[in-house]
């Protein structure tokens, strides 16, 4: 599959389930699942590499999602997959508002920290 073949872009759900988020203590001393920007970025890189059938090293976190053939339907699916991974709502326009893995991961981590 080429990096620009968007017609067939489908993001598979990993057989082992989503990557476990990093945990941190909450104000009440309980644990809260809040992935870091790095964890979210790694999750996105894994997802893109699996779909494109390339090594993780070939996925550039500063390259726009569109360069990898991520169309509107796949972007909406990706936001749904991120919702399941993060356990919270993710905008279906995430990849347009934050067009690279690095930007999207940082935004999602910052958003979680602000709501903590």
Image (tube, helix red, strand yellow):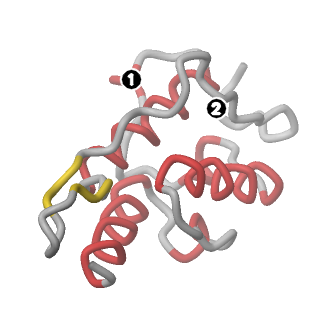
Instruction: Look at the picture and state if 23 lies above or below 83.
Output: above
In the visual, does 31 lie left or right of 77?
Answer: left
Instruction: Give the number of the disc on residue 56.
Output: 1
Disc 1, disc 2: CB below 8 Å? no
Q: In the picture, residue 96 is in which quadrant? A: bottom right
Q: SS of the residue at dot 1?
A: helix
Instruction: Look at the picture and state if 36 lies above or below 12.
Output: below
Q: In the picture, residue 89 is in which quadrant? A: bottom right
Sequence-wise first label, 1 or 2 = 2
Instruction: Look at the picture and state if 105 lies above or below 61.
Output: below
In the visual, does 116 lie left or right of 99?
Answer: left
Residue at 51% across / 47% down in the picture? 85
Q: SS of the residue at dot 2?
A: loop
| Quadrant in which the N terminus appears | top right
Given residues 67 and 55, the one toward you in this image is 55
In the visual, does 4 lie left or right of 23?
Answer: right
Label 1, label 2: how far apart the Cα atoms are: 14 Å
Provide the residue designation for mark 2. Answer: 3
Given residues 41 and 31, the one toward you in this image is 31
Given residues 10 and 58, the one toward you in this image is 10
Residue at 37% across / 36% down in the picture? 20
Q: How many marks?
A: 2
| Residue 84 % position (x, y) | 59, 50
| Residue 24 % position (x, y) | 16, 55
Instruction: Give the number of the disc on residue 47.
Output: none
Residue at 61% across / 16% down in the picture? 15
In the visual, does 100 lie left or right of 8?
Answer: left
| Residue 103 % position (x, y) | 37, 65
């Amino acid at each position: 599959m080429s990096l620009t073949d968007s017609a067939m872009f489908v993001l598979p759900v990993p057989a082992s389930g989503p990557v476990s988020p990093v945990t941190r203590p909450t104000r009440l001393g309980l644990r809260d699942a809040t992935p870091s920007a790095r964890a979210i970025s790694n999750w996105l890189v894994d997802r893109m590499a699996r779909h494109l059938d390339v090594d993780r090293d070939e996925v550039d976190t500063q390259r726009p999602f569109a360069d990898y053939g991520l169309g509107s339907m796949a972007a909406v699916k990706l936001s749904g997959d991120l919702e399941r991974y993060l356990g919270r709502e993710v905008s279906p326009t995430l990849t347009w508002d934050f067009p690279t893995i690095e930007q999207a991961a940082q935004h999602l981590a910052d958003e979680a920290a602000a709501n903590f």
